[in-house]
Amino acid sequence: MPETPDTATAAGDPAAAAGATAERSDLRNVAIVAHVDHGKTTLVDAMLWQSGAFREGADVADRVLDSGDLEREKGITILAKNTAVKRRHSHPDGSVSDLTINIVDTPGHADFGGEVERALMMVDGVVLLVDASEGPLPQTRFVLRKTLQAKLPVVLAINKTDRPDARIDEVIDEVYALFLDLDADDDQIEFPIVYCSGRAGKASLTKPANGSAPDSENLDPLFDVLLDTIPAPTYHPGAPLQAQVTNIDASPFLGRIGMCRVVEGTITKGQQVAWIKADGTSARTKISELLMTDALERVPVEQASAGDLIAVAGIADITIGETLADPDDPKQLPPISVEAPAISMTVGINTSPLAGRDGGTKLTARQVKQRLDAELVGNVSMRVLSTDRPDTWEVQGRGELALAILVETMRREGFELTIGKPQVVTQTIDGQLQEPFERLTVDIPEEYLGALTQLMAVRKGRMENMTNHGTGWIRLEFHVPSRGLIGFRTAFLTETRGTGIASALFDGYGPWAGEMRSRPTGSLVADRAGKATPYSMFSLQERGTLFVPPTTEVYEGMIVGENSRADDMDVNITKEKKLTNMRSATGDELVHLIPPRALSLEQSLEFCADDECVEVTPTSARIRKIILNASERARARSRAKK
């Protein structure tokens, strides 16, 4: 670590070494937090380009930190990642020094809140990014609440000021109201404001006109505010090593890698350290490789000091929350705590008649259990519990999206699974059954107000606020049980003709809201195995909406469509037209089929009824009845009524 005036004074003063703190003036650690799609990753792209991280003319993808396939496909950040940019900093005395800014890009979706909580433990301040048109939304509240709880200073960045519908003044007022609502103290609410256009790579301290880009040529004003507002990392000179694992990664060459922040002391490559596990036990181990981030690359280093964000290799079973400490004076850091899961679903092996015939290579219960256990290593906000079946487990997470992302990742790895309908995780408090609730915010055109209000009424949603911006759009806020949002997305997009925008945030537990009507339609269930024929599908499409195209292989108990009525209907979708030697008077006519409605994995999970599940393979997702045989299903219904 370079010796700064602060560190030199502290190191030469025994009194300072005993209890005073020193700071790293050459380093800043900052997280960028925001709601989904407010432009975090795009802004980081611009910061990297303007800091010389990429050579001129380099072929670099947009949203370079969203490196995962699912992140790019869905346009969201799922895993928190960090990068480092180098800046030349001019001091008041005229001298110039190098400054490193470690930037952590965090997820904006509350389902991945565990990533946000861990990221905030690595930094000394945050940039709160807010869209100049949409303003603060539920995930803005979530990430800001975590920031204020951590007592971190905030820089407000109003992004996308060049949007035609930008409303900068109103958005700033809404942010101040949000700070007050979250009980921010006086120091926290006195935050600087920077006006940005991440896509244009511009930032300014001067407020532009609505719909205009900032008046500067680059992001230098933002960098200057970060330097002035975000405090330098502090440490106690002479203190023993303490570093906490905040994330886990893997390398084909180095094995498991622990991502850490060095809180105290120094750490060197090849050093013997005390590895303090979550249960308090410790063991000696060796740091075989020490890495730090430079732009997007991890580069080997010989030593790192307090405040640095590092990656260590050589500890095969290291997990999140554990501490690396001085072997002669091991002191454990407080464990990482995250909010409890609110949604659960069952995950088991594929038990359908088509198991093993759809491209899957990992079919056994042992392989599924090992993969779920591996997920727990890097995901502290997820839990895996046993069930009464040896080949099925209950997986709990923050929300439907987090669980669906896990299933989608596993199917791409070659697993074949049976996934149960998502359920809420209830609690009994003082003898009263309680369930999780959500704060739902929707933006819709005014003409759909009645339809949405009716949709929320059957889901036990209570409207708490309505805002009309005078643009033909209104914003509604609801307090609704989490189970009321299971399957909500599809109905919401249907009622608003695909124009509505909805965001939800966990809002604590409350008394059980009572019985809730499930989807008003039933299922079309195949009554035999075979291939779907156009002849049969032509007559069935009058009964409802089909999910499968012609020639699809089906089996008894598989859901092939949605019935227009409330009850299920067993149908023969494999019936073929009988051939005769008699010609019809009108001749054979071409069969006109309505295109089937293809359901994604998330839509399939939403569609499921209580007695249905989803068969997931590398190439498809099929909805099926839990009990495939129609006679057995009828007997089970009779027993349930008694």
Image (cartoon, rainbow, N blue to C red):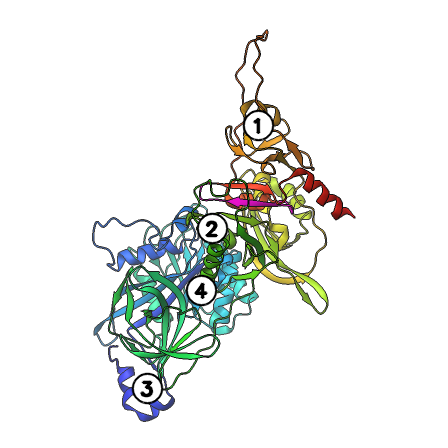
Q: Which residue is mark 3?
A: 238
User: How far across and how far down the image is residue 625, in percent?
Assistant: 61, 42
Q: Is residue 617 magenta?
A: yes
How far apart marks 3 and 1 lie (CA) works out to 77 Å
Of residues 169 and 609, the one nearer the viewer is 609
Q: CA distance from mark 4 to mark 1?
A: 46 Å
| Residue 377 image label | 4
Q: CA distance from mark 3 to mark 2?
A: 49 Å
Start and end of the magenta stretch? 609-619
Residue 314, position in %: x, y?
32, 70
Does dot 2 land on a helix, a strand or a loop?
Answer: loop
Give the amino acid type for the residue marked by disc 4 in the picture: Val
Which residue was labeled with disc 1? 574
* Mark 2 vs 4: CB contact within 8 A: no
Q: Name the foreground residue: 560 vs 334.
A: 560
Q: Quadrant of the N terminus?
A: bottom left
